[in-house]
Amino acid sequence: MIAIQTKYLGATDTRGSRIKAYTCNDHNLTMSYDYSLSGMELHKKVAVALCKKMSWSTDLIGGATKEGYTFVFKK
């Protein structure tokens, strides 16, 4: 089973704030920060988008970590 981790990437001189979803085997997706969402809702949106990109199930559960959130697939 694979876990999807997410983290906040702060704004730079050339890019706005973003959320990155990634796995231990280098699958990743970065999306612009959606200010209409917050917390776990926002991070889960990016994790689900990565799942769709990879044609994986989008039925996820997750929790907070020091860096962001971690999501795993429901059975």
Image (cartoon, grey):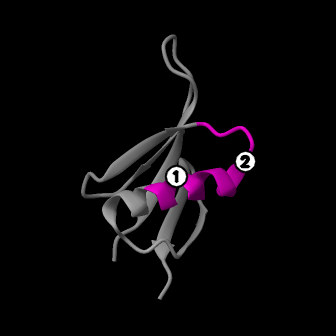
Mark 1 crowd level (few <14, some 14–19, many ≥20, 10 Å Cα): many
Residue 71's spot in the image, x, y percent? 50, 66
Q: Which residues are magenta?
A: 33-49
Residue 33's spot in the image, x, y percent? 61, 37
Look at label 1 and name its amino acid: Val
Q: Name above or below for residue 53 compared with residue 56.
A: above
Choose between 50 and 23: the one closer to the eye. Answer: 50
Q: Secondary structure at mark 2?
A: loop
Residue occupying image coordinates x 67% and y 57%? 41
Residue occupying image coordinates x 40% and y 67%? 3
Choose between 11 and 63: the one closer to the eye. Answer: 11
Is the stretch drawn in magenta largely helix, strand or loop?
helix
How far apart, in angstroms, are the residues tagged by discs 1 and 2? 11 Å
Residue 64's spot in the image, x, y percent? 61, 59
Residue 61's spot in the image, x, y percent? 57, 73
Q: Which mark is residue 26?
A: none
Instruction: Give whichever of discs 1 and 2 has the lower sequence position.
Output: 2
Based on the picture, tell me whether residue 42 belongs to the magenta stretch. yes
**Residue 65 appears in the rendering:** no
Q: Quadrant of the N terminus?
A: bottom left
- Residue corresponding to mark 2: 37
Instruction: Place residue 53 in its image quadrant.
Output: bottom left
Q: Secondary structure at mark 1?
A: helix
Look at label 2 and name its amino acid: Leu
Residue occupying image coordinates x 41% and y 62%? 52
- Is residue 50 toward the left or the right of residue 67 in the image? left
How many marks overall? 2
Q: Which mark is residue 46?
A: 1
Choose between 3 and 31: the one closer to the eye. Answer: 31
- Is residue 35 toward the left or the right of residue 31 in the image? right
**Residue 43 appears in the rendering:** yes
